[in-house]
Image: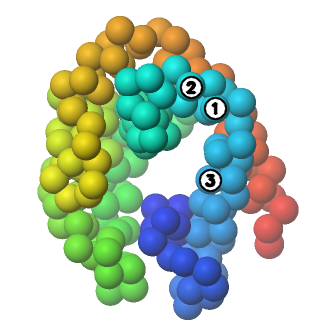
Amino acid sequence: MGNFIGDFVKGKDFEKYPTEIQKGILLHRAIDQFTDTHPIVSNTKVLLRNSFGRYSGIVADLYFDHFLAVHFSDYSSVKLRKFSYKFYWALWYNRRILPPRVKGFLWHFISTNRLCCYATLNGLRSSINIMSQYKSFPISSDEAIKFLQENYQELDRNFNQFFSELIDFANSTKNKNP
């Protein structure tokens, strides 16, 4: 949960949360730093820049979410559907302590099964359309899906190389924190 809400908890506000959620928020921040400075992620953004400009990082993130959902069984012994439902339950159970912005989209996030939707191109398209409705995100979902299809193998390879390193980083970071 802490990882999930990490973008919505600013500064020292993480200290208001239970210890385990604090650890997740801090891990999220470390993962963001690792990701933002990783050469594979930087190269992926360069690949996307001509088509998506300043939104290249967001599009790369969406593509990597897609590949994580597609390859979930390669990285976890738990099926994506089971993981998602357990996660949704934990979010709903703890909804009273979630940041207000998360509470605002929580029901929609759960009811549309967003985590599993990333595994399909139509689900990814739907997520992009949702972002375009609620954020200043002027990216056409058709354009984003077309780009993904045209560059699927390279983006998939980038994701798998990066994600293996990210897992190692996250595990070593978690082991350093009590």
Looking at the picture, tell me which residue is in the foreground, 160 or 135.
135
Q: Which amino acid does label 2 sit on?
A: Val
- From the image, tell me which residue sits under label 1: 42
Circle 1/circle 3 CB separation < 8 Å? no
Circle 1/circle 2 CB separation < 8 Å? yes
What residue sits 64% from the left and 44% below the top? Answer: 35
10 Å neighbourhood of mark 1: few (<14), some, or many (≥20)? some
User: Residue 102 in the image: x percent, y percent?
Assistant: 32, 71
Which structural element holds mark 1?
A: helix
Q: Can residue 5 be seen in this view?
A: yes
* Mark toward the start of the polypeptide (2 vs 3): 3
Which structural element holds mark 3?
A: helix
Q: Which amino acid does label 3 sit on?
A: Asp
User: Residue 32 in the image: x percent, y percent?
Assistant: 62, 53
Q: State the image quarter where residue 94 is shown.
A: bottom left
Q: What residue type is labelled 1?
A: Ser
Q: Name the image quarter holding the C terminus.
A: bottom right
* Mark toward the start of the polypeptide (1 vs 3): 3
Label 1 – label 2 distance at C-alpha:
6 Å
User: Residue 43 in the image: x percent, y percent?
Assistant: 62, 25
What residue sits 37% from the left and 68% below the top? Answer: 90
Q: How many marks?
A: 3
- Establish if 2 lies above or below 95: above
What residue sits 45% from the left and 41% below the top? Answer: 54
Q: In this image, 46 relative to 71: left or right?
A: right
Q: What residue occupies the far bottom of the structure in this picture? A: 16
- From the image, tell me which residue sits under label 3: 32
- From the image, tell me which residue sits under label 2: 46
What residue sits 64% from the left and 62% below the top? Answer: 29
